Image: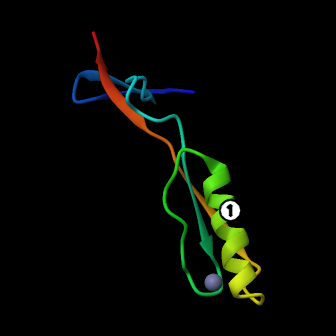
Amino acid sequence: MSAHTVIRFTDWMIGPERAPEAPPVIHELECTTCNAASKATEDFEDARDWAFEHVGRNPSHTGYREIIHRFWRATQVR
Ligand SMILES: [Zn+2]
């Protein structure tokens, strides 16, 4: 997945961040009832465990929204 465009006589490419220290994806789950949120984590199971705990304490909070962070990098093409 990448995109290519020309802005002000310079070619730019935007694609997934390939730096080794960049995590591929960060997950977060948010309660749609009270907006409480899990921590942002590379491991989806951590976010899911938070949701189990949250619904356990608040049995009426049954809706969740997942937020996914994906890192991108713009580079100049010559
Ligand atoms: Zn909640």
Q: Position of residue 2 (x, y in %)?
A: 51, 26
Residue type at numbered disc 1: Asp
| Closest to the observer, 26 or 49 | 49
Q: Position of residue 21 (x, y in %)?
A: 37, 29
Residues packed near mark 1 inside 10 Å, few (<14), some (14 to 19) or many (20 plus): few
Give the farthest residue toward the top: 78
- Residue at 40 percent across and 23 percent down: it is 20
Looking at the image, which residue is at 42% across and 35% down?
A: 72
The answer to whether the beta carbon of the residue marked 1 is less than 8 Å from any atom of ligand 1 is no
The percent coordinates of residue 9 (x first, y second) are 23, 23
Question: Is residue 6 found left or right of 56 in the rendered image?
Answer: left
Q: How many marks?
A: 1
Q: Quadrant of residue 19?
A: top left
Figure quadrant of residue 53: bottom right
Helix, strand, or loop for circle 1?
A: helix
Q: Judge by depth and name the residue closer to the eye, 56 or 9.
A: 56
The residue at 74%/77% (across/down) is 63
Q: Nearer the viewer, residue 77 or 58?
A: 58
Quick check: 39 above or below 33? above
User: Which quadrant: the C terminus?
Assistant: top left
Residue drawn at point x = 66 percent, y = 77 percent: 54
The residue at which mark 1 appears reads as: 49
Where is residue 1 shown, x and y percent of the image?
57, 27
Ligand 1 picture quarter: bottom right
As drawn, 46 above or below 78? below
